[in-house]
Amino acid sequence: MNPTTTRLGVIYECPDCETRYLDERRCPDCNLFCRRIDTGGHRPYCDEPVAISDLAEPTTPTTPQAVIMNS
């Protein structure tokens, strides 16, 4: 069994068509510069670009607790 290697790069997303690219800064279809999403790579099963932040579990924002002061 050969270990698979994944090449990490930068994921970019077109602001118009929302297509994601690995290490491509300009959308070839829309001819627009893409915005940087995060570090990432291709999914091993479908070869679609995915950012590491897409795979991480979202953190729940904590709400500040009221502080009651007794005098």
Image: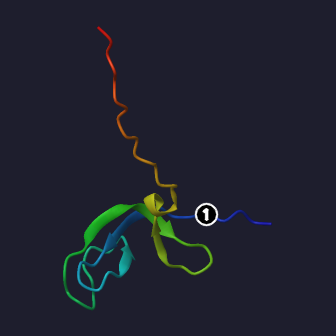
The residue beneath circle 1 is: 5
Q: Residue at x 31, y 16 (%)?
A: 69
Q: Amino acid at mark 1?
A: Thr
Instruction: Report the colour scheme.
Output: rainbow
Check the image and name the residue furthest to the left: 32
**Splitting the image into 4 quarters, where does residue 30 fall?**
bottom left
Q: Position of residue 25 (x, y in %)?
A: 27, 73
The percent position of residue 32, horizontal first and vertical second, equals 19, 82
Between 8 and 66, the one lying in front of the other is: 66
* Residue 26, image x, y percentages: 24, 79
Farthest front residue in view: 71
Left or right of residue 2: residue 8: left
User: Which of 65/57 is in front?
Assistant: 65
Tell how many labels: 1
Q: Does residue 21 sit above or below 57 in this rendering?
A: below
Q: Is residue 10 above or below residue 59?
A: below
Q: Label 1 crowding class (10 Å Cα cut-off): few <14, some 14-19, many 20+? A: few
* Helix, strand or loop under label 1: loop
Q: Residue at x 47, y 69 (%)?
A: 50
Look at the image and tell me in which quarter the C terminus lies: top left
Considering the image in quadrants, where does the N terminus appear?
bottom right
Which residue in the rendered view is the most extreme toward the top?
71
Farthest residue toward the bottom?
Answer: 29
The part of the image, by quadrant, that contains residue 67 is top left
Question: x, y (%) of residue 33?
Answer: 20, 76
Q: Is residue 39 shown above or below 33? A: above
Q: Residue at x 29, y 65 (%)?
A: 36
Taking 54 as reference, is 12 left or right? left
